[in-house]
C-alpha cells in the first residue's frame, strides 16, 4: 500500500510505523511551502492519504480531502505522533474487516 503524507516538516519514527504495517511512503509534502498549499494535480498511485492536522491550515486540508474523494483514495487525519497515527490506522483496519456478526468475531475485541 502506498501513502501520500501531507503535513509535518520532520516525520521522526512515522516511516518505521508505516513500514511495520506494510505501508510505503509514496510522497510527502510539508504543507508549509506555498506550492504545497495549492491543490495538487493528482494523488496518482496513492492508496491512502494521511493528513497531519497539527501542521496544516483548514484550506490545505480541504483541498487534499476533496481531491482524495474525487480520486476515490481513502484518507485519514490525525496529529503528527506515532501513537495518534497508530490508533487511526487501527480504526481503519478494523473498519475494513467484514465480519458477519459485527465486532463480535473480532480477535481484537476483549473477552468479558
Image (tube, rainbow, N blue to C red):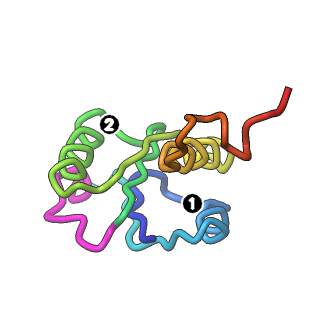
User: Do residues under tags 2 and 1 come within 8 Å of each other at their CB atoms?
Assistant: no
For this rendering, which residue is in front, 21 or 37?
A: 21
For this rendering, which residue is in front, 4 or 88?
A: 88
Which region shows up in magenta?
34-46
Q: Dot 2: within a 10 Å radius of its alpha carbon, few (fewer than 14), some, or many (20 or more) residues?
A: few
Q: Dot 1: within a 10 Å radius of its alpha carbon, few (fewer than 14), some, or many (20 or more) residues?
A: some
Residue at 18%, 60% in the rendered image: 40
Left or right of 81? Residue 48 is: left
The reply to whether residue 55 is visible in this rendering is yes
For this rendering, which residue is in front, 49 or 112?
A: 112
Dot 1 corresponds to which residue? 11
Image quarter in which the N terminus is found: bottom left
Dot 2 corresponds to which residue? 57
Q: Position of residue 69 (x, y in %)?
A: 21, 47
| Comes first in the chain, label 2 or label 1 | 1
Vertical placement of residue 16 versus 71, above or below = below
Q: Which mark is residue 94?
A: none
15 in magenta: no
The reply to whether residue 80 is visible in this rendering is no
Amino acid at each position: 500500500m502506498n501513502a501520500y503524507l501531507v503535513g509535518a516538516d520532520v516525520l521522526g519514527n512515522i516511516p518505521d510505523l508505516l513500514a511495520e504495517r506494510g505501508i510505503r511512503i509514496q510522497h510527502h509534502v510539508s504543507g508549509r511551502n506555498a506550492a504545497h498549499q495549492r491543490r495538487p494535480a493528482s494523488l496518482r498511485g496513492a492508496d491512502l492519504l494521511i493528513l497531519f492536522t497539527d501542521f496544516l491550515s483548514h484550506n490545505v486540508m480541504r483541498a487534499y480531502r476533496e481531491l482524495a474523494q474525487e480520486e476515490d483514495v481513502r484518507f485519514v487525519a490525525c496529529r503528527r505522533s506515532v501513537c495518534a497515527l497508530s490508533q487511526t490506522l487501527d480504526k481503519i483496519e478494523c473498519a475494513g474487516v467484514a465480519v458477519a456478526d459485527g465486532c463480535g468475531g473480532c480477535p481484537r475485541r476483549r473477552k468479558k
